[in-house]
Amino acid sequence: MNGTDREIEELVLKESIVSATGLRPDSLQVGIKGDPSLRETALYRTKYPNVMDQVFGQVQPRLADLLLHRGTYRIYIGFNSAEIRTTSIFDPLREETHAAEKFLDEDYLERHFPLLPFDEKVQAMRDIYEGLMHSRLYARLPSYWRSIFEKRHASWKPMEKDQVPSILATLKVLRDMPDYYLRSTTLCLVQDLIRMQFNCDGTQLVRTDNYARFLEENFG
């Protein structure tokens, strides 16, 4: 590769839509266009309610509980598929898939999602990255990648606790919209970012501190 480590580091961060440090500072939100046929036919496709639509009002506080009081740090909510995918700090390299209606059973949550206070979970995230940065694997990284990770690690903060329930509370409204409605969304405490896919096409990536503005500008 041509260029100094600093030049390559700056290029890596500039080229990525969501880089190792998140959305670029000048990007409060980013839209990635998908299949144009989805956009062109969105208003002609009938929307059918499913299990997730029926139970989400009850499931919503359980999802907040996972992020705030249990080991889960990332949640994918598939409204069309009625599935919920979770990733736990206890097993960070694997993703689990759950049927939405299972979250109505409190005993199911107790069996599958061990309790862990939010602050301890955040510290565990720091510890995992700290351990990686002192591993033999880390030494295999090019120096410009080590620089990116070290700077991010020094300044990293998780998604704010109070943002979790407020974001989840808006999803039903976005799902119930008659024309361009929410198909899926991902919340991750590690990245201060919300991923949303609507029935029209593509993906919307929004920084959490810009989420309220995004809703106001696009949905009134």
Image: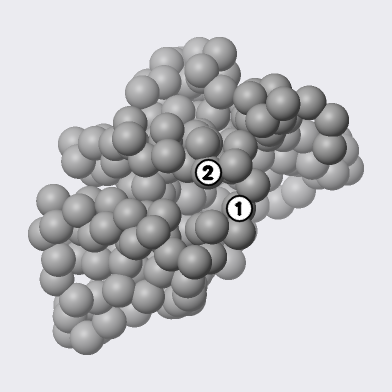
Q: Amino acid at mark 2?
A: Arg
> In x, y percent, where is residue 125?
30, 55
Tell me which corner region of the image, top left, top right, bottom left or bottom right, holds residue 5: top right
Which disc, if any, is residue 132? none
Tell me which corner region of the image, top left, top right, bottom left or bottom right, holds residue 114: bottom left
Regarding residue 101, the answer to whether it shows in the image is no
Picture layout, residue 110 above or below residue 167 = below
Image quadrant holding the N terminus, namely top right
Foreground pick, 21 / 48:
21
Secondary structure of the residue carrying numbered label 1: loop
- Tell me whether circle 2 and circle 1 mark residues in contact (CB < 8 Å): yes
Foreground pick, 49 / 181:
181
Which disc, if any, is residue 141? 1
> In x, y percent, where is residue 220?
46, 16
Tell me which corner region of the image, top left, top right, bottom left or bottom right, holds residue 8: top right
Graded by Cα atoms within 10 Å as few (under 14), some (14 to 19) or many (20 or more), the crowding at tag 1 reads: few
Secondary structure of the residue carrying numbered label 2: helix
How many badges with numbers are in the image? 2
User: Pointer 2: what residue?
Assistant: 146
> In x, y percent, where is residue 87?
40, 67
Picture layout, residue 168 above or below residue 113 = above
Q: Residue at x 54, y 29 (%)?
A: 23
Q: Report whether 166 appears left or right of 219.
A: left
Q: Amino acid at mark 1?
A: Leu
Regarding residue 143, the answer to whether it shows in the image is yes
Q: Residue at x 60, y 42 (%)?
A: 143
Q: CA distance from mark 2 to mark 1?
A: 6 Å
Q: Report whether 180 appears left or right of 175.
A: right
Which badge, 2 or 1, comes first in the chain's sequence? 1
Q: Report whether 26 appears left or right of 7.
A: left
